[in-house]
Image (cartoon, rainbow, N blue to C red):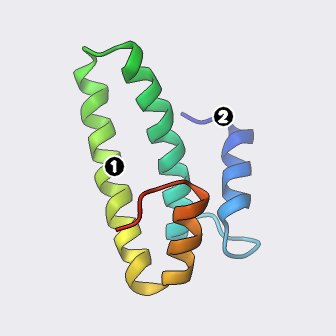
Amino acid sequence: MLPKEKKKKIIQKSALHESDTGSAAVQVSLLTERINRLSEHLKKNQKDRHSRRGLLKMVVRRRKLLDYLKNTSADVYGRLATELKLKQK
């Protein structure tokens, strides 16, 4: 889990408007942070299969959200991909 302060910063950084807490852009940003943290954990604990499965599920969920963003608003997708340093399809 992310600490509340870190989560608030991420939400404020990627929110599309002031009260935005659940848009696809915010969800992608939060998932990216969780994926990065879990990847670090798995580098130290290679045999943790349960966490690896959770990581794969998060990656798939993020990919689906990114595809949705790409189809609906390409400018937000491009900004988010460069901001989070993601490979663009």
Q: Is residue 22 above or below residue 59?
A: below
Q: Position of residue 18 (x, y in %)?
A: 77, 72
- Classify residue 48 by image quadrant: top left
Residue at image position (42%, 58%) is 87
Residue at image position (32%, 65%) is 64
Say which of 4 and 45 sits in front. 45
Furthest toward the bottom, the residue is 72
Tell me the amino acid under the disc marked 2.
Pro
Residue at image position (49%, 48%) is 32
Q: Quadrant of the N terminus?
A: top right
Residue 59 image label: 1
The reply to whether callout 2 and callout 1 are in contact (CB within 8 Å) is no
Residue at image position (28%, 54%) is 60
In this rendering, position of residue 4 left or right of residue 47: right
Q: For the residue carrying disc 2, how many other residues have a C-alpha within 10 Å: few (<14), some (14-19), or many (20+)?
A: few
The residue tagged with tag 2: helix, strand or loop?
Answer: loop
Q: Is residue 60 above or below residue 69?
A: above
Q: For the residue carrying disc 1, how many other residues have a C-alpha within 10 Å: few (<14), some (14-19), or many (20+)?
A: some
Q: Position of residue 81 (x, y in %)?
A: 51, 63
Q: Position of residue 31 (x, y in %)?
A: 47, 49
Tell me the amino acid under the disc marked 1.
Val
The residue tagged with tag 1: helix, strand or loop?
Answer: helix
Q: Quadrant of the C terminus?
A: bottom left
CA gap, disc 2 to disc 1? 21 Å
Badge 2 is on which residue? 3
Q: Is residue 62 above or below residue 36?
A: below
